[in-house]
Amino acid sequence: MEALRSSAPQILLSALQRHRWVIAALVAGALLRLAVALAYHPAIFYNDSFVYIRQAFNIGGPGLITFAPDRPAGYPLALHLLGASLGWVTSLQHLAGLLGGGLLYWMMRRLGVGRSLAAVGVAVVVLDSYAVTLEQLILAEALFTLALTASGALVVAGRRWWLLALGGGLLAVACLLRNTGYLLIPAWVVFLIVRHRRHWVPLAAVVAGLATIFVPYLVWQHSVIGRWTPYSTTASGWFLYSRVAPFGSCNGVSVPANATALCRYTAADRGQGPEYYLFAGGPARRLFPAEYPGGGGDIDPVAVNGVLRGYAIAMIEARPLQYLGASLGDFFKFFEPGVAASGDDFETILLADEGRSTGGTGTPVSTPYFYNGSPTPVAGHPFSPGAALRSYQSVFHTARWLLAAFVLLAIGTPLLRRSARGRKLPPRPEQIVLVGGPLLALLGQAATAQFAVRYEIPFVGLLAAGGVLAISDLTRLSRSELRGEDRRYDRRAGIVGSWPALASRAAAHRLSPVIGQTTVQTPTGLEPDQTSAADWLRARPRASLLAALATLVALVVIVWLITGTGGSPPASPAPAAPATVARIGPIGLSVGGLAGMVNGTLRQPTYWAGPKSGVVYELTRTTNGNVYVRYLRRGAKVGDPRASFLIVATYPYPNAFHRLQAVAHGAGVTLADGAFVLPDAGYPKSVHMAFPGVDYEVEVYDPSPAVAVRVAKSGTVQPVG
């Protein structure tokens, strides 16, 4: 025991020495992440960040989280479990980036890649400034990256059935974080069939892992919203429409009768990309001005989605070459240096010099922007060392030309087959997962939506590992040419080497090299849990048949759960059903008209700041029940886009009084009528209010912070009527 204790430091020092290059890369990556976390503390926000936060804490609704129709619920669930601390969330996301790098190193070493070369592959991933920026954002990409990287590593390099099952479970987690994960499932299945074509256990283990996550999640989801499918049923048509809209002229195309209005293009629509047709303009925006992917207006979102999907399918059937050209054009952009995404998607992965603020109602004006923990984002410059980080990012970011080289190496290396002396390159079915899976996912993204660099970042690790693996094989082949060695590859153990070295290394894996095959030793006295499950089944044909049938049944169940429509309403031929509440306004009203509208039509608590002379009261209600009363001065028109007027907003918010006091941390004041008033420290133009026993939060906004505070504390903020 004493000798063991004295040798422990030596063992540790030896391990550090052997793996010094990857440790250096991980330490550098950790320091980079620490610098970003300090400069942009506690988080960077993008438009979608607000949606995730709303889902995570189900503001204004019952239940644990909100199931949105246009995005998976995995990330909101993770945010809910992690709590409301943004710094804690981003810290864990940075840790996930480093953990992914470590898993890639472990996988590459298991596949026979040298330590130095594997460390280079890890450095490409953990020092990528785009990836680090995404980890500082409140977005699903960081956790999605870890889930798919860990799944790929375990499925490719795992030697035990429970590791393969864990890999399958992590693949399901990736699917519930981002819908792109579903496109990886075929690559994983094909790899398992090719790699373990004579054994059912690996495939059964991965399928069991998938089912272990999917089944409980879908049962829970169905109990809450009555839907079995984990993907969107009301957004796919929007994205597919935006894909075909750039070439969507209806000349010579038979479109469904309820979609003919989508054929009416204007001169301003020509030459626009998918982002424009999805959010800014085009026939769909004019036909459904208040609707967006997943709903938002007064029309049944399933019906709207069905109209757009029918139009898109008609266009694809009539113009398949144009659709293919548009899809491949966006796909190749993933590997073309310098090409940025349309809209503000590219800004998402850039470290900004100045945060952008929001309007008085909390609606983002531009993105990205910083967030300091107050109810609304704030404008401002990042802390030190923000300038140095932006300089670093201008040089060290995702090199798309390098990813293209990795892909070409991974695809081209097996084509060499043999060297000039007849030496064989090892077969690499692992490239189906490392390269085939990411390519399939990126192609699916381009075919169903559009190109954006941030969609590529999660796959950088697998693509880099595939390229490094190909370089390793080519290097070994070149060295064997010089030494004249006979190089062999053990398919089961995943190790490459000369024949004498292979024999000794295979013994360490309890494998015996036999010419043309590999057999597993099971000596007498071997522990039962050390016996290969594949050998146990091979000795029991009936059990093998049962395992095959169980795998088939599990696959059918998963496919049905993912693609079935149980619980989902069918797309109706025309929009009809109302949304949650009817959207109203903006409309201009007098004092009497405002009271009549609130008491007769809205029939929900609506606050205002009392009557004022010389103003028109502009009333707007959104479909989620938010009501805005805006005080338009004489000369201003209803719908004036300027944020230059006093606004009193009323938001549905259960237990608003106690929840606002909880986030105040001792700040704020209580008025004589019991109202609690909390000025927004991060955005002084807004003041938040709550009243005892009222499940609504009130926000007072004015271009002048002093006026906003004065109005909120004046006691005039009361229900209309």
Image (spheres, grey):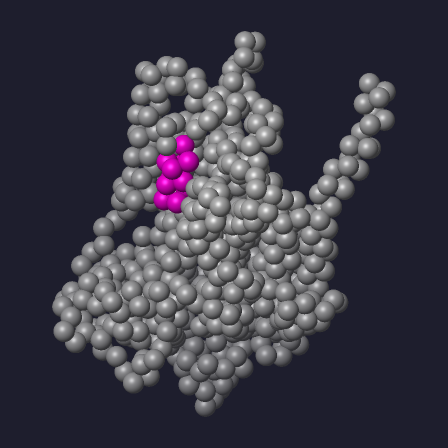
Residue located at (33% from left, 43% from top): 562
**Quarter of the image where one finds residue 347:** bottom right
Residue located at (80% from left, 37% from top): 13
Quarter of the rendering occupied by the C terminus: bottom left
Nearer the observer, 289 or 537:
537
**Quarter of the image where one finds residue 700:** bottom right
Nearer the observer, 610 or 67:
67
Queried whether the magenta region covers residue 188, the answer comes back as yes
Residue 282 higher or lower than 1, as above or below: below
Residue located at (64% from left, 69% from top): 395
> Where's residue 567, x and y in %?
28, 43
Q: Residue furthest top?
A: 524
> Where's residue 704, x and y in %?
62, 79
Identify the magenta region. Answer: 186-196
Nearer the observer, 507 or 682:
507
Residue 317 higher or lower than 552, as above or below: below
In-image side of 663 versus 1 (left or right) = left
Nearer the observer, 211 or 320:
320
Residue located at (39% from left, 53% from top): 440
Q: Residue furthest bottom?
A: 635
> Where's residue 167, x and y in %?
49, 37
By secondary structure, the bulk of the magenta-drawn segment is best described as: helix
Count every numbered label the image shows and give the total.
0
Confirm whether residue 219 shows in the render: no
In-image side of 388 versus 365 (left or right) = right
Residue 109 higher or lower than 594, as above or below: above
**Quarter of the image where one finds residue 664:** bottom right
Quarter of the rendering occupied by the N terminus: top right
Confirm whether residue 186 shows in the render: yes
> Where's residue 329, x and y in %?
37, 68
Queried whether the magenta region covers residue 249, the answer comes back as no
